């Protein structure tokens, strides 16, 4: 008789015998760098050569859709409908990765060749997001091997443009709402709070990237002959940034300061760990004063300067440049008026005498802030299942600190959203030396088999 325990043992065997690593290596080998135009054919290759065959082996019908937005890559949709009366689970992943940054990895590693080193598995896309959706799809496979059926309906969306802002994803969802109809989204992205404990989050902070620029004149002028006579764009820009956030990073624009850090959210965050022993130490005197680290990163907005430049930093000369710019970003929580972000910034700069600082919205994408109540029945169901499998009470977050296209599921499709990340904070996501930890991946595979098994046996929670 099929059993939950034996299905989980199948997952353990799949991981331990090297099949998981072999499957992951093939996915990583396809350089799906969505930020590089010349790699766009690799996005379709990933879907056609790897994901479609995997899903069809699991009994899914698949279809690949071109993206209506020329800035985005294709989508793969798969579905396995066993009975219209059964609950339907939608899952998601993204096959694209950020630039490989070849030449910057330790020990000369090739970002698109999987390499093991102790408990680490290196490769671009291991943490974000190829390993994560591979785990979820293979967990479905373990259920099918054990029971010959899922016991629920399942739909899958794999996009290929998440790293460039999920261009065209919401339009795709708007056009295909009926096709994508489901009872819940259960998907994986981002890191656990601690590597040895499962995490569940129900939404994400929004992200808005923009450029500030001061353009006063063509070229540069000798700093001796013209110093004190010509306005310096870099100094103007630095002062403009200082009126957005103070010396400890506290936001000074009233409209950018959220009102949604309520008592229930503070209660949910109060015992959660923040940071990672293998990552940088948390700055004690940085961010909003009076908030705990968890409140600052999960319950508040944060402003960051991603890059800034004036002149030629690599080879400075004695000259005052006529141009300066900074690429900036706001991460924001639910309750922040995202439509008013740039208008309020414009008004704030003008009020402080920085009318000559131009604002340009970046093409790198924009994500809304979302948050599902943590007492939603699907959240409770997932938490109970994960604890039963792992033996540990999962950490529960109202939202991820980072950003992802959760609004497409929560707002456009109207679904409860349950995210179960399979990476960890020290994974070097978006940097050289990206990796996953073998114990985390193995544990995640076991947990997802257990969760899908429980849905199969118990159905949708009331």
Image: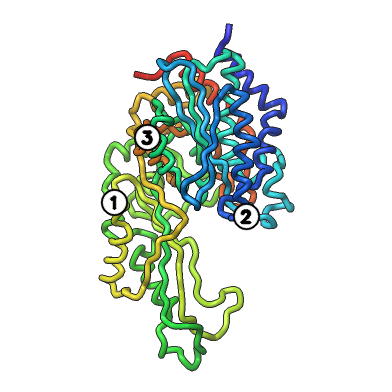
Q: Secondary structure at mark 3?
A: loop
Q: Is residue 383 above or below residue 243?
A: above
Q: Is residue 345 above or below residue 105?
A: below
Q: Residue furthest right?
A: 108
Residue bearing mark 3: 413
Q: Quadrant of the N terminus?
A: top right
Residue at image position (40%, 40%) is 408
Q: Which residue is mark 1?
A: 337
Farthest bottom residue?
225
Q: Earlier in the sequence, mark 1 or mark 2?
A: 2
Residue at the image position 45 percent from the left and 89 percent from the top: 227
Q: Which mark is residue 38?
A: 2
Secondary element type, mark 2: helix
Along the viewing direction, whichever of 144 and 401 lies nearer the viewer: 144
- Horizontal side of 434 relative to 150 (left or right) equals right
Quadrant location of residue 397?
A: top left
């Amino acid at each position: 008789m099929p059993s939950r325990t034996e299905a989980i043992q199948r997952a353990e065997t799949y991981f331990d015998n090297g099949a998981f690593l072999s499957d992951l290596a093939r996915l990583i080998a396809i350089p799906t760098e969505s930020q590089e135009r010349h790699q766009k054919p690799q996005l379709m290759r990933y879907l056609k050569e790897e994901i479609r065959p995997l899903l069809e082996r699991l009994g899914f019908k698949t279809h690949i859709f071109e993206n209506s937005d020329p800035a985005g890559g294709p989508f793969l949709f798969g579905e396995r409908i066993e009975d219209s009366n059964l609950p339907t689970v939608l899952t998601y992943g993204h096959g694209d990765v950020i630039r490989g940054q070849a030449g910057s990895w330790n020990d000369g590693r090739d970002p698109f060749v999987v390499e093991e080193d102790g408990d680490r598995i290196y490769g671009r896309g291991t943490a974000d997001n190829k390993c994560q959706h591979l785990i979820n799809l293979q967990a479905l496979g373990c259920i099918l091997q054990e029971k010959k059926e899922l016991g629920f309906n399942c739909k899958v969306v794999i996009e290929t443009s998440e790293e460039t802002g999920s261009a065209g994803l919401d339009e795709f969802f708007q056009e295909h709402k009926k096709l994508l109809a489901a009872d819940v989204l259960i998907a994986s992205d981002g890191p656990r709070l601690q590597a040895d404990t499962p995490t569940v989050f129900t939404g994400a902070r929004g992200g808005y990237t923009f450029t500030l620029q001061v353009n006063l004149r063509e070229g540069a002028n000798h700093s001796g002959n013209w110093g004190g006579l010509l306005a310096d764009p870099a100094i103007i820009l630095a002062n403009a940034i200082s009126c957005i956030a103070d010396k400890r990073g506290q936001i000074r624009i009233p409209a950018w300061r959220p009102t949604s850090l309520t008592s229930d959210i503070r209660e949910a965050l109060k015992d959660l760990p923040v940071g990672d022993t293998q990552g940088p130490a948390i700055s004690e005197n940085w961010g909003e004063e009076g908030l705990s680290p968890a409140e600052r990163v999960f319950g508040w907005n944060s402003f960051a300067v991603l890059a800034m430049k004036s002149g030629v930093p690599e080879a400075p000369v004695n000259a005052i440049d006529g141009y300066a710019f900074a690429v900036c970003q706001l991460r924001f929580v639910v309750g922040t008026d995202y439509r008013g972000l740039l208008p309020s910034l414009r008004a704030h700069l003008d009020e402080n005498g920085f009318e000559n600082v131009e604002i340009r919205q970046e093409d790198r994408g924009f994500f809304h802030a979302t948050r599902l109540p943590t007492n939603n029945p699907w959240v409770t169901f997932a938490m109970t299942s994960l604890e039963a499998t792992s033996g540990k009470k999962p950490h529960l977050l109202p939202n991820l600190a980072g950003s992802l296209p959760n609004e497409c599921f929560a707002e456009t499709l109207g679904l409860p959203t349950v995210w179960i990340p399979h990476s960890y904070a020290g994974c070097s996501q978006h940097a050289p030396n990206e990796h996953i930890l073998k114990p985390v991946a193995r544990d995640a595979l076991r947990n997802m088999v257990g969760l899908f098994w429980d849905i199969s046996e118990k159905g949708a929670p009331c």
